[in-house]
Image: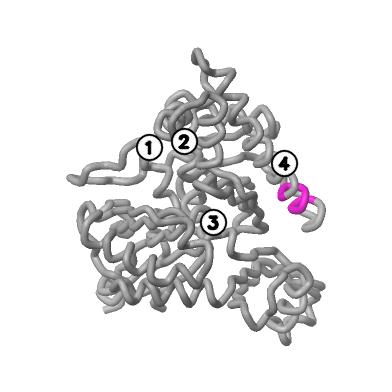
Amino acid sequence: MSQLFYKERPLIGLDISQTSAKIMALTPKKWAVTGYGSVDLDPSKTSSPQDLRGHLEGKLKELLTKHMVGRLPSRQAVVSVPTSRTFTRSLTLPREAEADLMNAIQLEAEQYIPISMDQLYIDYQVIGTSKESLEVLMSAVPKLQVDTTLEACRAAGIEPIVVEPSINAVARLIHEAEEGSLVTVILDIGATATDIAILDKTIRVTGGVGVGGHTMTLAVMQELNLTHDAAHMLRTHNGLMVSPKQAAIHKALEPTLAKIVSETKKVMRYYTERLGKKAKIEQLIIVGGGSNIPGIGDYFTDNMIIAARTASPWQILDFGKLTPLSRQLKPRFITAIGLAMVNQKEVWQ
């Protein structure tokens, strides 16, 4: 009976960022893609919850009716919220705090979250214990952001079952397909922002910087005096690899990449110094639509002095008779895949 019970409640992944919404449906354990699709969002209408509701509802309806490849097994979804809108930290608390753990977590959170506690949804997971202390992973997100997103999903005919920061979904996929058992720096380079996280069995700390793929395309436009489409093509096809325009492209991309490097080093220092972690950070994995830059792995390897590469989980996915994602679109679906990978038994138990 229990096996049938879980089959009756398949979940799809719905990744909602500032610039797009992506859906992915997978057959559990078989890694078979049954459906996927994406639609662009207007960043000017997703930057605030007040503008998001109507715009997202309309775009999700458009996605479901006009932009799907294959089919969805259900409309029940694991939905992401942008990591840049969330606050995630690993906290070390005295063992006696266990008696009233949520209150202790809120007191800690008040010290670094610039939003009133009554305006936040807060969740936590105990990830380590000793005789003297507890290690707790805490995540908080503004209620207005979540409530508005869920209202838009339901109005479009999608039933949200789980909500999580997008970086958590990325970590789930990396753990499965990219030697995620190693202590890993995750760089999720989106269109307008880059999310940074340390994965050490679970997400330990997150950070971010307000630059991304679109930032880099604009820089190439200005440096080489190109149209937007020509600059995007040059960034995604030539990138940092040897080419007649390599020097000019590198000059254009360097300021943005340097900002990402600087912020990533801050997150790494927080992990080792503030959290007191002695485990060696062994790899840096780059994901996201803005990561589609030839040579970007070598750039971060050279500037971070750590083995870096772009994620390539596609070998585990089976598109069957469906048209596979194009090379350029693949990086955009990393989060949606991670969302679709949620263990259904954990959700429905």
- Point out which mark residue 262 bears: 4
User: What kind of residue is marked 2?
Assistant: Asn
User: What kind of residue is marked 4?
Assistant: Ser
Of callouts 2 and 1, which one flags the residue occurring earlier in the amino acid sequence?
Answer: 2
The stretch of residues the image draws in magenta is 267-272
Secondary structure beneath label 4: helix
Circle 3 crowding by C-alpha within 10 Å: few under 14, some 14–19, many from 20? many
- Which residue has dot 1 on it? 328
- Point out which mark residue 167 bears: 3
Place of residue 134 in the rendered image (x, y in percent of width and height, measured from the top left) = 74, 71
Place of residue 299 in the rendered image (x, y in percent of width and height, measured from the top left) = 61, 29
Magenta region includes residue 146: no
Place of residue 182 in the rendered image (x, y in percent of width and height, measured from the top left) = 60, 46
Of callouts 1 and 3, which one flags the residue occurring earlier in the amino acid sequence?
Answer: 3
User: What kind of residue is marked 3?
Assistant: Ile
Residue 282 sits in which quadrant? top right
Of callouts 3 and 2, which one flags the residue occurring earlier in the amino acid sequence?
Answer: 3
Q: Residue at x 28, y 77 (%)?
A: 5
